[in-house]
């Protein structure tokens, strides 16, 4: 947990944007009675503050340390728990189904937009559980899990194979956070973000942010695309075994 990585202004700006987007998705479904209510599946399609995080080099730095600087977003969601309720993330689960012993292919973070407390449903996590493929028994999980408690603006980094679960929000206010999962640059995204964002104004997003969104990890669709100068290619990633400097050939 890195406390206060994001400032108060970001949280205060992101929360109303998030609540508006939640209502838009409920309108899309025609009801609030669907399993993902309160969970946006593709935050970046709503623009605004959601596009700031991929370009935040301080936030992304720990992912680059472990997954390499060509790592890209696998999933970018939210987890908002309504007052006096839970949501679908209250089940004991992992955020990445693939299990490769001894190899880290994916990492994630929770960006806390509100203070996380036991009362408002701070996430349960089971330390060390990313090392096992089997879902822990419910009694064992809640006996050995710990709760995330930290101020708004904090970021919790974790292996996406970590078994965890949202808590029950016993307050009268929503509890909000954003969730970003990162993978090595040669893996697929759960949602094709370059296509999903085709109608979004990205003119203010840096090349660093575009890379994290996957814009430089798109396979070429023709020979002419493949042989474009490096700066014009849709695929600019290098493998983790290549040197940092890639020749333009």
Image (tube, rainbow, N blue to C red):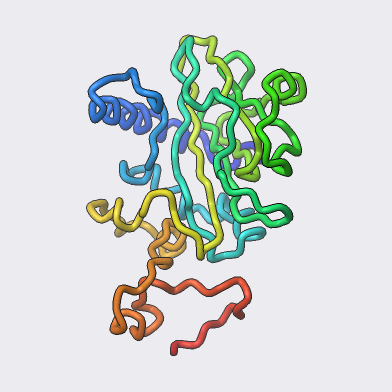
Q: Is residue 6 visible?
A: yes
In the visual, does 79 lie left or right of 94?
left
Give the x, y percent position of residue 158: 65, 43
Quarter occupied by residue 97: top right
Which one is nearer the viewer's eye here, 53 or 134? 134
- Residue 77 location in percent, x, y? 44, 39
Q: Tell me which corner region of the image, top left, top right, bottom left or bottom right, holds residue 201.
A: bottom left
Q: Is residue 5 left or right of residue 173?
A: right
**Percent x, y for residue 48?**
34, 43
Q: How many marks?
A: 0
Image vertical order of residue 68 relative to residue 168, above or below: below
Left or right placement of residue 213 versus residue 159 in this view:
left
Residue for point 37% across, 32% down: 18
Q: Position of residue 152 (x, y in %)?
A: 56, 30
Residue shown at the point (46%, 55%) measured from the top left: 55
Query: On the rendered image, what quadrant is the C terminus found in?
Result: bottom left
The residue at 73%/44% (across/down) is: 131
Give the residue drawn at x 74%, y 22%. 140
In-image side of 164 versus 88 (left or right)? right
Instruction: Quadrant for the N terminus, please.
Output: top right
Is 146 situated above or below 96? above
Q: Is residue 13 visible?
A: no
Residue nearest the observer in this picture, 140 or 40: 140
140 or 148, nearer to the observer:
140
Q: As drawn, which residue projects farthest toward the front?
A: 134
Question: Is 92 in front, or is 7?
Answer: 92
Q: Relative to 217, does residue 145 appear above or below in the rendering?
A: above
């Amino acid at each position: 947990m890195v406390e206060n990585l994001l400032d108060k202004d970001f949280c205060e700006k992101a929360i109303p944007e998030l609540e508006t987007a939640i209502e838009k998705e409920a309108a899309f479904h025609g009801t609030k009675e669907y399993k993902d209510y309160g969970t946006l599946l593709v935050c970046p399609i709503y623009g605004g503050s959601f596009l700031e995080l991929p370009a935040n080099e301080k936030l992304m730095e720990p992912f680059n340390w472990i997954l390499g600087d060509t790592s890209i977003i696998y999933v970018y969601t939210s987890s908002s728990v309504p007052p006096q309720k839970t949501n679908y993330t209250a089940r004991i689960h992992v955020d990445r189904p693939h299990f490769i012993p001894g190899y880290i292919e994916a990492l994630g973070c929770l960006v806390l937009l509100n203070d996380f407390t036991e009362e408002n449903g701070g996430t349960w996590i089971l330390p060390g559980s990313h090392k096992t493929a089997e879902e822990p028994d419910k009694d064992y999980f809640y006996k050995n899990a710990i709760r995330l408690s930290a101020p708004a603006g904090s970021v919790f980094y974790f292996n996406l194979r970590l078994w965890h679960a949202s808590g029950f929000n016993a307050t009268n206010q929503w509890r909000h956070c954003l969730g970003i999962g990162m993978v090595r640059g040669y893996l697929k995204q759960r949602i094709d973000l370059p296509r999903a964002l085709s109608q979004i104004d990205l003119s203010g997003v840096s090349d660093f942010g575009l890379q994290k969104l996957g814009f430089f990890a798109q396979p070429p669709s023709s020979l002419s695309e493949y042989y474009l100068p490096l700066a014009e290619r849709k695929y600019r990633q290098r493998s983790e075994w290549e040197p940092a400097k890639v020749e333009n050939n």
